[in-house]
Image (spheres, grey):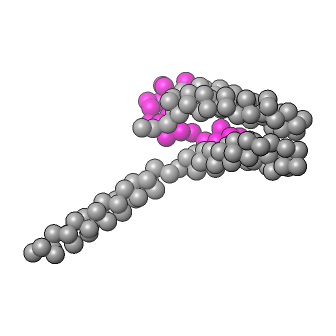
Amino acid sequence: MKTTLPLFLTIATLLSSVGFAQDHEEKETELYASMERMDDAYKDLRRAMRGASDENKASYLELADVMLKEATDSKKLVPEKVKKLPEAEQEKMLEEYNRQMDGLISAVEAIRNALEKGDYGTANTMLRELRGIKSEGHDTFKED
């Protein structure tokens, strides 16, 4: 009996972990995946910019290009939260989503332009400001 309880607890823990993983996979949408790729590029760029130099400019621009592509692609998608709203509210929320995505795209373009010019201080400042844009978008459109 003493060995049965730990075995049972181990199996129960593993099964609950599998259930959690399945729930997470079900929530992963095309929009979620695109946003994750953008976030990964954002984090990589922030790290790379800590010791910014012209010799790494090409890699900075590549990361900014990934961010720009994913932001542009994400704008074409509809958040799950919007899809679940009554039809009358969907249009208004979709307009707000597009407005915020346009702001994000403009911000990433400005970062890319600063990087292109070698203005790494300005690019770093704008990268920090993206956190606010991200928070606003997630507060409004990301499901809990």
Question: Is 60 on the left-hand or right-hand side of 47?
Answer: right
Pick the residue in front: 46 or 113: 46
Q: Quadrant of residue 15?
A: bottom left
Q: Residue at x 60, y 28 (%)?
A: 132
Residue 122 in view here: yes
Q: Quadrant of residue 67?
A: top right
The verdict on residue 78 being magenta is yes
Q: Residue at x 50, y 51 (%)?
A: 28
**Residue occupying the far left of the picture:** 1
The verdict on residue 103 being magenta is no
Pick the residue in front: 109 or 2: 2
Residue 88 drawn above or below residue 38: above
Question: Is 134 on the left-hand or right-hand side of 49?
Answer: left
Q: Residue at x 69, y 42 (%)?
A: 46
Q: Magenta region, mostly helix, strand or loop?
A: helix
Locate the C terminus and report the quarter of the image it occupies.
top left
Residue 35 drawn above or below residue 141: below
Q: Position of residue 129 (x, y in %)?
A: 67, 28
Q: Position of residue 14 (x, y in %)?
A: 31, 65
Start-end of magenta stretch? 71-92
Q: Quadrant of residue 72?
A: top right
Locate the N terminus and report the quarter of the image it occupies.
bottom left
Pick the residue in front: 79 or 139: 139
Residue 94 in view here: no
Q: Position of residue 117 (x, y in %)?
A: 90, 35
